C-alpha cells in the first residue's frame, strides 16, 4: 500500500474498516509471522542545527536559528513555538513565576500523552489542552487565529476541566501546520521553512528573532539589568505535534523543545582575578580586517574597537593598550597559530618596530582611497568610552588566505589597562579575538575593477 503523500503505509490511509466510504486500502490485522514488511511511520522531531547572531538584520540585530524537523503523518497538526514572557523595563531584578519557569521543561508541556494515566485521565490528552498551550507559550500566530475562529471556539466550548470526558472529537483539528511566518507580538521576527528532502520528507527552517523583541517577549534574562542590556538570555525553540485519533476525544500529542542560551557576541564581561568587579569592562567589541594594495603587495591590519564601561578611564601610567602586549597570530586554532608581536618588543623585533614596514604602511595609506589608520597608537583620551586600535599584520592577501571551511583565522591578543574612577584602582584584562578568513571577509581599499561590455 502506498499512501497518497508518497509514504508507504502512512497512517492517514488507515481508515476505520467499518466505514462504508472507504477509498483507500484497509489495513487488516495479520499474524506477526506472516509478513516481513514493517509498518512505516513517518518520523516526527526537531533538531536545532546552529545559532548565530546577525548584527545587521532588523532593528537591533537578530538571532538566527537554523533547524531540521519532520512532521509525522499527514493528518497531524504541527506548530513551532517559543516562550511567552514579558520583561518589564522597570522590574529589576527580573522575577519569573514558577509557571513561566516550568515552560522551559518539556515535561510541563500542557498537552501530550507522556504523563497520561488511563486510570486518572485529564484533559491534557484532549484538544481542551490547546488554549492552555496557546496562552502559556508563544506558538506561530496562525494557531491562535485558528483557535479564535467561531468553529474552533464552538468545538472547545464543551471542555470542562472537572470532567475530562467532556471534550471535542480529536479529528475536528484541520490538517494544517503552523510553522511560519511569525510569532504573536513579534512582527519583526520571521520564520521560514522548506522541504529539504521531499520523499521522507525532511524539512529545514530558519527563525530570525529580532534581538529587541526576543528580550522583551520570549526570553528569561540572566542578570539584574534592563532587558536590552542583559548579557545572557535564555529561550527555546519547540515543535508541538498534535495527532487526531479519529472520532475519539484522545489527542495523541507530543513536543520537542531545545533550550538556547544566548550571549550577545559583541559584548564582553570580564571577571577580575583580584576581587569582584560589578561593572562591565567592555560594553561592545569588534574586529575588522582591512587590506590595501601597495605596489605589487597587499598590506593588512586589524581594527579592534570597543567601548569601555562608564566606570573606567585610561590608565595613563601604562597606556590603555601597552604596546608590548599586542600579539597577532595566523592559523586554524589559537593554540597552534603562528604568533608574532605586532607593536613593540624590547628586542625591537615586532612588526611595527621595522622601519621598512612603517615606510610601506605610510606609503600605502597615503592615497585618499585608503583610511587614515595610525598603527599601534594607544589613545590617551577617549570620547564616550569608544576606542579604535589599529594593529599591523604585514603582508597578506585576504582572497588567497580565505577558506570556506573556516580553517584559517587571524587572532589578536592584547591587554587593556584602565583605572576605576571611584576607587582609583588599576584593572586590566585581555582583548582576545579571532577573525575567520573567508571570501568577502575583508575591507579592501584602493581596488580597481575594469569591465567591458561588447555590444
Image: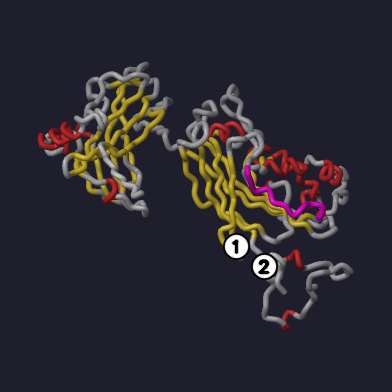
Tell me what residue is drawn at x 56 percent, y 26 percent. Answer: 93
Cα–Cα gap, marks 1 and 2: 9 Å
| Quarter of the rendering containing residue 88 | top right
In the rendered view, does 328 fall on the left or right side of 12? left
Tell me what residue is drawn at x 67 percent, y 43 percent. Answer: 139
Instruction: Name the main secondary structure of what is drawn in magenta.
Output: loop
- Look at the numbered disc 2 and give the secondary structure of its residue: loop
Count the marks: how many? Answer: 2
Residue corresponding to mark 1 = 198
Q: Residue furthest front?
A: 455
Q: Nearer the viewer, residue 295 or 80?
A: 295
Q: Nearer the viewer, residue 406 or 451?
A: 451
Residue 434 seen in render: yes
Residue 344 seen in render: no
Instruction: Tell me which segment is drawn in magenta.
Output: 171-181
Residue corresponding to mark 2 = 6
Amino acid at each position: 500500500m502506498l499512501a497518497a503523500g508518497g509514504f508507504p503505509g502512512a497512517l492517514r490511509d488507515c481508515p476505520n474498516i467499518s466505514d462504508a466510504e472507504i477509498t483507500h486500502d484497509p489495513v487488516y490485522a495479520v499474524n506477526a509471522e506472516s509478513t516481513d514488511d514493517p509498518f512505516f511511520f513517518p518520523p516526527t522531531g526537531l533538531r536545532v542545527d546552529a545559532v548565530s547572531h546577525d548584527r545587521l538584520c532588523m532593528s537591533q540585530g537578530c538571532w538566527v536559528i537554523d533547524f531540521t524537523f519532520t512532521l509525522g503523518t499527514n493528518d497531524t497538526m504541527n506548530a513551532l513555538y517559543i516562550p511567552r514572557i514579558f520583561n518589564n523595563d522597570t522590574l529589576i531584578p527580573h522575577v519569573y513565576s514558577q509557571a513561566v519557569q516550568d515552560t522551559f521543561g518539556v515535561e510541563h508541556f500542557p498537552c501530550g500523552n507522556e504523563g497520561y494515566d488511563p486510570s486518572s485521565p485529564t484533559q491534557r490528552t484532549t484538544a481542551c489542552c490547546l488554549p492552555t498551550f496557546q496562552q502559556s507559550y508563544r506558538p506561530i500566530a496562525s494557531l491562535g487565529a485558528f483557535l479564535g475562529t467561531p468553529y474552533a471556539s464552538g468545538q472547545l466550548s464543551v471542555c470542562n476541566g472537572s470532567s475530562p470526558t467532556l471534550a471535542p472529537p480529536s479529528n475536528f483539528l484541520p490538517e494544517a501546520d503552523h510553522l511560519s511566518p511569525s510569532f504573536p507580538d513579534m512582527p519583526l521576527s520571521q520564520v521560514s521553512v522548506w522541504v529539504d528532502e521531499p520523499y521522507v520528507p525532511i524539512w529545514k527552517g530558519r527563525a530570525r528573532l529580532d534581538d529587541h523583541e526576543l528580550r522583551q517577549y520570549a526570553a528569561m534574562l540572566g542578570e539584574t539589568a534592563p532587558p536590552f542590556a542583559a548579557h545572557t538570555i535564555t529561550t527555546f525553540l519547540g515543535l508541538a505535534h498534535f495527532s487526531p485519533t479519529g472520532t475519539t476525544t484522545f489527542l495523541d500529542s507530543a513536543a520537542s523543545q531545545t533550550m538556547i542560551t544566548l550571549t550577545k557576541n559583541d559584548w564582553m564581561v570580564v571577571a577580575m582575578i583580584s576581587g569582584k568587579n560589578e561593572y562591565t569592562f567592555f560594553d561592545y567589541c569588534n574586529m575588522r580586517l582591512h587590506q590595501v594594495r601597495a605596489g605589487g603587495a597587499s598590506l593588512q591590519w586589524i581594527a579592534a574597537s570597543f567601548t569601555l564601561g562608564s566606570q573606567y578611564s585610561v590608565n595613563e601610567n601604562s597606556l590603555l593598550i601597552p604596546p608590548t602586549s599586542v600579539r597577532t597570530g595566523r592559523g586554524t586554532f589559537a593554540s597552534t597559530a603562528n604568533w608574532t608581536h605586532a607593536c613593540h618588543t624590547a628586542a625591537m623585533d615586532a612588526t611595527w618596530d621595522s622601519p621598512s614596514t612603517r615606510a610601506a604602511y605610510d606609503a600605502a595609506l597615503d592615497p585618499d582611497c585608503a583610511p587614515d589608520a595610525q598603527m599601534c597608537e594607544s589613545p590617551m583620551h577617549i570620547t564616550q568610552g569608544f576606542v579604535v586600535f589599529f594593529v599591523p599584520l604585514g603582508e597578506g592577501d585576504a582572497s588567497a588566505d580565505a577558506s570556506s571551511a573556516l580553517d584559517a583565522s587571524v587572532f589578536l591578543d592584547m591587554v587593556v589597562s584602565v583605572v576605576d574612577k571611584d576607587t582609583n584602582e588599576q584593572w586590566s584584562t585581555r582583548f582576545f579575538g579571532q577573525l575567520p578568513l573567508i571570501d568577502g571577509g575583508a575591507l579592501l581599499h584602493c581596488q580597481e575593477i575594469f569591465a567591458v561590455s561588447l555590444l
